[in-house]
Amino acid sequence: MKTKQFFRFILLLAFLLQTGFAADPPKISIRQLKTILRDQGFSGALDRDASFRSLGVFDCGANKYRTFYFVWSETRPDGSPGHGQQRIIFIGAGNKYFGSYSIEDPPIRVTRDVIVVSSDAYGRNEIRCADGEPSSDYNSFGK
């Protein structure tokens, strides 16, 4: 009887893995994230003025991406305003840096299949999946 239950469990597990019901990608520490970005061509600053916040998993069907909100604000000794930037960063399977979107304000809403940001000059305000990847038609996708 136990052999039959074990066999059913194995079949169920194989089915779930085959249909894309696999677990989310493993979490990435900030230290790991900075190393990945530094080694794979991220063009943003990764110094002490950079901060990251995990946004969770962006689900594009068979492809899942870890997403992070990146903020860099220059610290000036005199306290005056400096340069800065904000991005949404995508890390794919095998800790591969997929790319980032430059944004003006923090994301308004983040779910597993859409990231809502303030509108760009063309009125677009959502990042969605297209062909298993984050859409590249959003105004400011790049490295």
Image: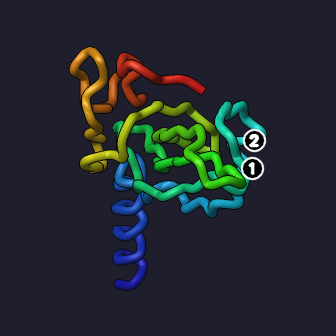
Which amino acid does the dot numbered 2 rest on? Arg
- 10 Å neighbourhood of mark 2: few (<14), some, or many (≥20)? some
Q: Is residue 87 above or below residue 110?
A: above
Q: Quarter of the image holding residue 97?
A: top right
Asked if residue 121 shows in the view, the reply is yes
| Residue in the image at 36% along x and 47% along y | 106
Q: Name the residue under label 2.
A: 38
Q: Quarter of the image holding residue 125?
A: top left
Q: Name the residue under label 1.
A: 35
Q: Position of residue 14 (x, y in %)?
A: 42, 56
Most foreground residue, 108 or 22: 108
SS state under label 1: helix
Q: In this view, does 67 lie above or below 133?
A: below
Query: How far apart are the alpha carbons under marks 2 and 1?
Result: 5 Å
| Residue in the image at 55% along x and 40% along y | 84
Q: Are marks 2 and 1 in contact (CB under 8 Å)?
A: yes
Most foreground residue, 103 or 66: 103
Residue at the right extreme? 39
Q: Where is residue 46 in the image (x, y as percent from the top left)?
A: 70, 47
Q: Where is residue 62 in the image (x, y as percent from the top left)?
A: 40, 38
Q: Quarter of the image holding residue 12?
A: bottom left
Which amino acid does the dot numbered 1 rest on? Thr
| Residue in the image at 42% along x and 29% along y | 133
- In the picture, measured across the screen, residue 138 lies left or right of residue 38, that is left
Q: In this view, does 85 lie above or below 10?
A: above
